[in-house]
Amino acid sequence: QIDGAGSRLCVVQVDLNAMADVAGEQAPRRFKVAGEGLELTITLDAKWQARPFQQAVALPFVKKFNSQQREGGRQLSVEALCGVQIDGAGLSRVADARLAAAGLVVPPAASRVELTFGESPPTELRLRVACGDVSVKLTLDKRWLGKTVAEAVVKPFLSVYNRRQPTATPPRTPEQAVEIHADGA
């Protein structure tokens, strides 16, 4: 808008209720969380609304689900969360929702949150890494699976590779790796 003096005016509307939510003055929120044949009711006070969605909503659901499974039954993990619907409307960016405050992901009027899980990521991965006549077996546990391929595979392999080379050969670095083939591909 332009006022009588020719200056631009900016009109800003502030929703004080939304501001109270962000400031941590939220009323408790109670809603159903469902998925994989289980339904439970969660109540989030202000403290829990400020925590990440994955910690405040998904993790309690996963723990309850896993505690009810028979030995050898399917176990869920928060990392396998691949879909979230709130009152029938799907969230387009589940990865962003995981880390956002639960109070921002689940609206105050929400009554039902549906969670969908894919396959849980592996807890361990066994690899054979080879270059020339040097071959090394690596086992990557959860700690290593969270790292980059360069950190978890290339650097440890090159440490062994460089020790097995003649002393006159300059050591190889991860930056010199031009190609990495998985299962020969």
Image (spheres, rainbow, N blue to C red):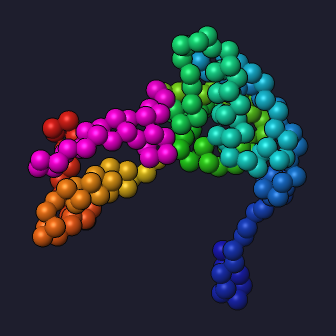
Q: Which residue is drawn at 12% across and 70% down?
A: 168
Left or right: 6 as drawn, with respect to 143: right
Asked whether 26 or 132 is in front, the reply is 132
In the rendered image, residue 180, in percent from the top left (x then y), is placed at: 20, 49
Residue 122 occupies quadrant: top left
Say how many tags the image has: 0
Q: Which of 147 and 92 is in front in this view?
A: 147
Q: Is residue 1 shown above or below 117?
A: below
Residue 129 within the segment the image draws in magenta: yes
Q: Residue furthest bottom?
A: 5
**Is residue 114 shown left or right of residue 110?**
left
The residue lying at 65 percent from left, 34 percent from top is: 58
Q: Is residue 64 left or right of residue 85?
A: right
Above or below, comparing residue 98 to residue 7 in the picture: above
Decide if residue 93 is in sight here. Answer: no
For image coordinates 27% across by 54% down, the residue present is: 160
Q: What stretch is highlighted in magenta?
A: 119-145
- Residue 97 at what x, y percent from top left? 60, 44
Residue 110 picture location, percent across and down: 74, 33
Give the residue at the far front of this rendering.
Answer: 167
Query: Which quadrant is the C terminus positioned in?
Result: top left
Name the residue located 54 percent from the left edge and 13 percent from the top edge. 72
Residue 5 visible in the displayed image: yes
Identify whether 184 is placed above or below 99: above
Image quadrant occupied by the N terminus: bottom right
> Residue 14 in magenta?
no
> Which quadrant of the view contains residue 108?
top right
Front residue of this view, candidates 141 and 51: 141
